[in-house]
Image (cartoon, helix red, strand yellow):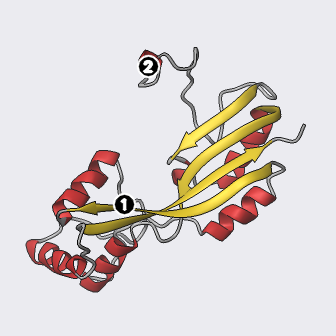
């Protein structure tokens, strides 16, 4: 929807990565940016990529792994011990699943990307604008009271750097090719 006006590819399709609405052996490039971490069945995602890619076709993706938003996770644990931050796959799981997928990993790496925010409200607003929600079982229900918010702010301030409050994203970058 956003790329079409920019004059990119001639045809766009939105679909579920675990059940791609595409014909087999028909795609040269599959691209996903920060979406696959929400897929419960990553092996199924890789199987679908294997199915729809032409021989020599490429899957290029970025995703998130363990360590993402660790500062926020640690701060919440100091406040109440509940799970407030989504859990992500381990990088080693990405390595293992990609290696076993039948696709050839050309690149698979993890890189820390750190964003800085003036305050906790700026960080949480940014997360809400991204559409991030706590999807974990065991998350607390109801509204978060003022005292817990104050305790969270105090705990997060321990991470402050000269540039501001850090939010670390452990980003997985992968490029896999279907054998010819």
Q: So how many labels did they put on this image? A: 2
Residue 80 vertical placement versus 162 (above, below): below
Tags 1 and 2 touching, CB below 8 Å: no
Residue bearing the label numbered 2 = 6
From the viewer's perspective, is the residue at label 1 or at label 2 nearer?
2
Question: Can you name the residue that lies furthest to the right here?
Answer: 180
Separation of disc 1 and disc 2 at Cα? Answer: 33 Å
Residue 36 vertical placement versus 69 (above, below): above
Residue 84 vertical placement versus 15 (above, below): below
Q: Residues within 10 Å of mark 1 (few under 14, many from 20)?
A: few
Residue bearing the label numbered 1 = 134
Quarter of the image with the C terminus is: top right
Residue 74 lies in quadrant? bottom left
Residue 129 in the image: x percent, y percent? Answer: 28, 46
- Relative to 14, is 168 on the left or the right? left
Question: Can you name the residue that lies furthest to the front here?
Answer: 162
- Circle 1 — which element? loop
Residue 49 in the image: x percent, y percent? Answer: 72, 40
Residue 148 in the image: x percent, y percent? Answer: 16, 77
């Amino acid at each position: 929807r956003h790329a079409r006006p920019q004059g990119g590819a001639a045809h766009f399709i939105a679909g579920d990565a675990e059940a791609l609405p595409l014909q087999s052996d028909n795609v040269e490039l599959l691209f996903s940016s920060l979406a696959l971490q929400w897929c419960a069945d990553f092996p199924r995602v890789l199987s679908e990529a294997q199915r729809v890619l032409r021989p020599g076709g490429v899957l290029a993706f970025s995703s998130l792994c363990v360590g993402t938003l660790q500062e926020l996770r640690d701060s919440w644990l100091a406040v109440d011990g509940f799970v407030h931050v989504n859990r992500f796959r381990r990088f080693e799981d990405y390595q293992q699943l990609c290696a076993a997928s039948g696709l050839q990993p050309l690149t698979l790496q993890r890189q820390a990307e750190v964003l800085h925010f003036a305050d906790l409200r700026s960080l949480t607003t940014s997360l809400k604008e991204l559409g991030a929600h706590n999807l974990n079982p065991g998350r607390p229900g109801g509204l978060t009271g003022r005292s817990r918010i104050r305790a969270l702010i105090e705990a997060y301030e321990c991470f402050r750097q000269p540039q501001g409050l850090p939010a670390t994203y452990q980003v997985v970058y992968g490029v896999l090719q279907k054998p010819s």
